């Protein structure tokens, strides 16, 4: 059965989304999961093929097998969790919460979409099973609903030594005249 749910408001008191809870809510375009949520059950969010953006809270600890599969329209993921949530699935067949590593069905989210994670955690995500399905993991502190300093021009000697290029790769020494990411915002080095 296909549900025509286009918006949802999950209360902050919810700690777990049970198995198949939003199964085939195919009209849902944006999913903001509340702070306090810890677990997403197996197939809980399966076949949300209109979903363009998902925001996982900092409290999330586990994402169930197949729970985020068939998200063909997904354009970006935000995950505020400082430790990558555990991805349930079958590691022997590369079946992640977002689908199979080797699937060419066109129904799974692309592994090239940006996945925004807290600053200092990209390597943790790149090395965590399930999250390693994605190859565009970017560190930020500019999550939806938060504010950050963006688009500032600063003198090179005033800058914090940690910079990222526009693809999210850490840069050891920034070059004058180039734009980098720092604390979720773009910075021009001069």
Image: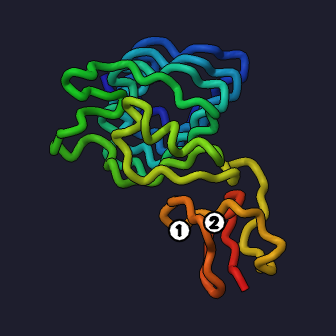
Q: Residue at x 45, y 49 (%)?
A: 52
In the image shown, does 160 or 73 lie closer to the viewer? 160
Left or right: 149 with respect to 40? Answer: right
Q: Look at the image and tell me in which quarter the N terminus lies.
A: top left
Quarter of the rendering containing residue 4: top left
Mark 1 nearby-residue class (10 Å; few <14, some 14–19, many ≥20): few
Q: How is the image coloured?
A: rainbow
Of callouts 1 and 2, the N-terminal one = 1
Mark 2 nearby-residue class (10 Å; few <14, some 14–19, many ≥20): many
Q: In this view, does 119 lie above or below 174?
A: above
Q: Is residue 22 above or below residue 142?
A: above
Quarter of the rendering containing residue 97: top left
Callout 1–callout 2 Cβ contact below 8 Å: yes
In the image shown, does 179 or 155 lie closer to the viewer? 155
Residue 96 locus on image (x, y percent): 32, 28
Q: Residue at x 39, y 16 (%)?
A: 42
In 3D space, how far apart are the residues under numbered discs 1 and 2 (Cα atoms)?
6 Å
Q: Which mark is residue 181?
A: 2
Q: Look at the image and tell me in which quarter the C terminus lies.
A: bottom right
Residue 83 locus on image (x, y percent): 59, 30
Left or right: 109 with respect to 53? Answer: left
> Circle 1 is placed at which residue position?
166
Left or right: 87 with respect to 62? Answer: left
Residue 153 locus on image (x, y percent): 77, 80
Q: How many numbered marks appear?
A: 2
Q: Residue 116 carries which label?
A: none
Left or right: 136 with respect to 120? Answer: left
Q: In this view, does 179 lie above or below 124?
A: below
- What is the secondary structure assignment of the residue under circle 1? loop
Quarter of the rendering containing residue 56: top right
Q: Residue at x 57, y 14 (%)?
A: 16
């Amino acid at each position: 059965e296909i549900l025509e749910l286009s918006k949802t408001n999950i209360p902050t008191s919810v700690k777990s989304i049970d198995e198949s809870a939003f199964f085939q809510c195919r009209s849902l375009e944006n999913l903001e999961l509340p702070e306090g949520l810890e677990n997403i059950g197996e197939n809980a969010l399966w076949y949300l093929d209109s979903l363009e953006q998902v925001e996982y809270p900092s409290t999330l600890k586990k994402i169930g097998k197949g729970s985020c599969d068939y998200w063909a329209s997904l354009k970006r993921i935000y995950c505020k969790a400082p430790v990558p949530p555990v991805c349930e699935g079958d590691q022997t067949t590369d079946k992640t919460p977002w689908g199979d590593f080797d699937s060419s069905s066109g129904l799974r989210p692309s592994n090239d979409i940006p996945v925004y994670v807290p600053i200092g955690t990209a390597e943790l995500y790149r090395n965590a099973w399930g999250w390693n399905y994605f190859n565009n993991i970017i560190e930020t502190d500019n999550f939806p609903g938060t504010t950050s300093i963006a688009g500032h021009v600063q003198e090179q000697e005033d800058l914090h030594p940690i910079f990222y290029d526009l693809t999210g790769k850490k840069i050891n020494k920034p070059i004058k005249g180039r734009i980098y990411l720092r604390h979720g915002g773009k910075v021009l080095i001069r």
